[in-house]
Image: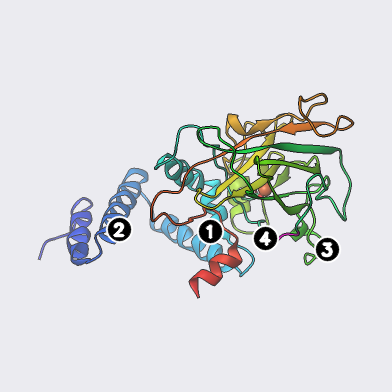
Amino acid sequence: MQDLDREGITAEVIAQMATTPDPRLRQVMDAAVRHLHAFAREVELKPEEWLQGIAFLTAVGQACTPHRQEFILLSDVLGLSRLVNVMHDATGREEAATETSLLGPFFREKAPEFAPGESIAVHEKTGEEVILFGQVLDASGMPVPGAEIDIWQTSGLGLYDLQAADASVMDHRGRFRADAEGRFHMRTVKPIGYSIPMDGPVGPLVKNQGRHGMRPAHIHLLVAAPGYRELITALYLSDDPNIDSDTVFGVSQSLVVTPAMGVPGAPRTDIPAIRYDFRLSRRAAGETGGRVGADPSQITKAAE
Ligand code: BEZ
Ligand code: FE
């Protein structure tokens, strides 16, 4: 029997967990314990702070419902979701593929289907109309025919349909099919920036850190075609005041866009347009999906 001092406890826990048969579980838990103990030593964690941390995580768990995932929100505001995305993108990704961005909590399966050129602002039409058009390409620049493009965003009032009075009505979201040359064309209204959900335990944490809690205006997209890695990304509007301080770290330079008049090739010339070509990466053999920030209801289903 060894007396466990502030260093010895770590080695003792790792020694006891060495019987873990699954090597990946052993590796992950070893690292988790080493880093957790190092963190407690670094900040000289006090018992009352430990208890406060337990109470916070308990509240995060209690805020989760089949339609709300407060733990993912916590992961988002701590930059963990972005880090996992960045690392995943770097595995087996061809150089030229479009960068990914967070799926977020407002994705819905089976959004309404639209014909090319139709507008996804069907019920709430407030806001400046814009066209989004372009081509779906592979990493070498060859067209990917018939890709399915899911698009979803806030209305021009800054709310997702799921946050509206009647959340059963789908609006500002839809599915489009690219043509045989990978070309697509859709209409929407300019989204505006909005606050992440601040009414759970993550909200006060963000406020206590002096952060604004806002996301810059963006349009979410999910582009899928057989044989290619599903692309989950978003386009961010350059004129948003919070473009450089997204609370959930979703913005990359390559995803920032500016609607403009006179964009070459725009299918309509009377409203501003965004041209964006999406480049898909081939799916590696045996690779499965893996969405960071997935729809909480899907997570619930997967866990059942
Ligand atoms: C969003 O893009 O809608 C979002 C992403 C992460 C956290 C909250 C909202
Ligand atoms: Fe969003």
Estimate the x, y position of residue 231 in percent, counting from the top left: 56, 46
Which of marks 4 and 2 precedes in the sequence? 2
Foreground of the two, 133 or 28: 133
Per the image, is 109 magenta? Answer: yes
Residue at the front extreme? Answer: 180
Identify the disc placed on residue 108.
Answer: 4
Q: Residue at x 80, y 39 (%)?
A: 190
The amino acid beneath tag 1 is Phe
Q: Contact (CB < 8 A) between labels 1 and 4?
A: no
- Left or right for 292, reference 164: left
How far apart are the alpha carbons under marks 2 and 4?
A: 33 Å
Q: Quadrant of residue 182?
A: top right
Which of marks 1 and 3 precedes in the sequence? 1
The amino acid beneath tag 2 is Met
Q: Which residues are magenta?
A: 108-112
Q: Which secondary structure, mark 4?
A: loop
How far apart are the alpha carbons under marks 1 and 2?
A: 19 Å
| Residue denoted by label 3 | 165
Identify the disc placed on residue 71.
Answer: 1
The amino acid beneath tag 3 is Ala
How far apart are the alpha carbons under marks 3 and 4?
A: 17 Å
The amino acid beneath tag 4 is Arg
Estimate the x, y position of residue 35 in percent, counting from the top left: 32, 49
- Left or right for 43, reference 257: left
